[in-house]
Each structure stands twice: as C-alpha cells, then as structure tokens.
Amino acid sequence: MKQKIAAFLLAMAMATTSVMPVFAEERIPTADDTEVTTGEWVDTTSPVLTDELTALFEKAISELTGKNYIPVAHLATQIVDGTNHMFLCREADVAPEVKEVYCLMVIYESPDKSKVSVREIKASKVETGITDMEGGIQQAKSPEVTPELLEIFQKPYELIDGVQRTPLALVSTQLVNGMNYRFLVKKSPVVPDPEVDYCFITIHKDIEGNVSEVDCISMWDSPELNSNEVKLKRGKKFQLEVINTDQAVKWSTNNKKVATVSKTGKVKAKKKGSAIITATLEDGTALICNVNVTK
C-alpha cells in the first residue's frame, strides 16, 4: 500500500494564498530527523492531548455539524505559514444507527495562534467499538505508549523479521480473560523506500502473561475475503476469513449439496459441482467466494 496518509493529504487544496498545501511531500519523517523543512510532517514525540491541544481541537470543530468528533491522539505536525496538526479522532454520525469509526483530522493554526480551522477529515472504515457497557471496549485513559506497553506490543513479533511495526498511540482497551490493547501502528517492510501502511493492531495479554496478536486491520482497506475462488476435491476443507474488519460475520451457501460452510467460515466440499459462499457483515456488506468441487 502506498503511503495512504500522504496520499489523502497530497490531495488537499491550498486554503488561502498565504497557506501552503497541507502536505508538500510524501514522506512523513520522525522526530529523530536532524532537519525539518517546510512541508514535512513530523511524528509527535508524544500522542498525549494536552489542555492546549484539546482547546485547539474544540475551537476548530465548533462550527462543524452533522457529526461528532472526539480526539484520541495528536499524531504529527507540519510547519507551514503557521502549523498543521494531525489528530486521530473518533467520528460519530448524529444518526444513532451509524456506527462510530476512526478518522484523521488536519487542523491549521495560524502563527499567532489566533485562528484555527479544520483543513481535512479522512474517515476510515475501522469501527471503534467503544462502549460505556461494563466489559466492553473503552477508550484508553492515555494514548501514550509507555515502555511497559511497548514491551507488550513487541512480544508477538520477536521471531518475525522483515517488518517494522511502530505503535503511535494506544487507542482502546478491553478486559477479556486478561486485557486487549488496540494500537494505531505504522507498519512497513524493512527495505529502502518502503511502502507504509497505517493499521490498528490488537494485542491480547492473558491472565498468565502470555501475549498474542488478535487482529491487524488496515486503516483504509475495505473488508475482503482471504480468497474469492476456491477449488476443492470432495471431502476436503478450506478456511475462509474476512480481513480488514472486526464486524461480526454470517456465513451461508447457496448449494449445501455441493459445499457447506460453518459459523466460523470453514468450507467443506460435499460433491462435484459449484456453490457460492457468502459472508454477510453487520453493515450489510456481502462478500462472495465461488467454490468449485471436483471428484
């Protein structure tokens, strides 16, 4: 995946003749860079929302209507004629049946800090799942990735080479036979000029201290099946999965005589012929896999 955050920011037009385009270069450098030039985005050294940043955010969104926004983390800044700030937010429609998702918001602040305005909002398809119910997913009390949290995050990947995963912020937690931690993560292969993916990774630490990855959901990709076409011999099985979503899935087949599918997406070939396996998500999205069974 090309740098998606860079791509959406590159598409922004100039707000005024005195303000540069929000994103002038593709690369998002880190705070470790020795030089920062105008137009570069720099990851913040801490994602924590200070009182000053919270006030800036609230002032900027005060005139927005139709949706509600809750700031989660302060991700990056850009020096222009003033400063652009990138926030990770929760976006909720005023219609209660529309589920809350994560989004990126860019807010411009003038040099004298007297003027602020929302420059761009990019909503992802990743639902927050956050609820007030006991035992449900809760927004993290702080987005700071502490040394203890960093150790938990890195544990599942100790034996995996070739991919760099940088947790930018802790976004939510859930008590479930231990604790689930969901991080916003910058992920890229360890190669020159890597393509960067921004995703949400959930890590589970059980009551005995064992740590494992629960899921990894790209911030921008749509839900899809791990395979859209499967060829099986009679009696063989294949595990279908829906990736890039944490929605509940209902599985069905249009021809049980040829192929059946379990509640978890396991397909079993019964007799020669063709069948269509459908995965239906909570929001009504239907994903289809064509199954061809041979003798």
Image: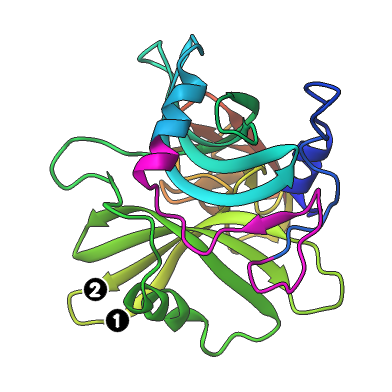
Q: Is-magenta flag for residue 13?
A: no
Q: Quadrant of residue 160?
A: bottom right
Which residue is tagged 2? 206
Q: Is residue 41 left or right of residue 174?
A: right
Q: Is residue 248 visible?
A: no
Q: Is residue 160 above or below residue 51?
A: below
Check disc 2: other Cα within 10 Å, few if <14, some if 14-19, many if 20+: some
Give the Cα distance between marks 1 and 2. Answer: 5 Å
Q: Residue furthest left?
A: 134
Q: Which residues are magenta?
A: 30-54
Name the residue type under label 2: Asp
Amino acid type, residue under disc 1 in the picture: Asn
Residue 88 rendering spot, x and y as whole percentages: 51, 43
| Residue depicted at 46% across the width and 23% down the height | 59
| The one of 56 and 238 positioned closer to us in this rendering | 56
What's the residue at 46%, 55% (across, down)? 47
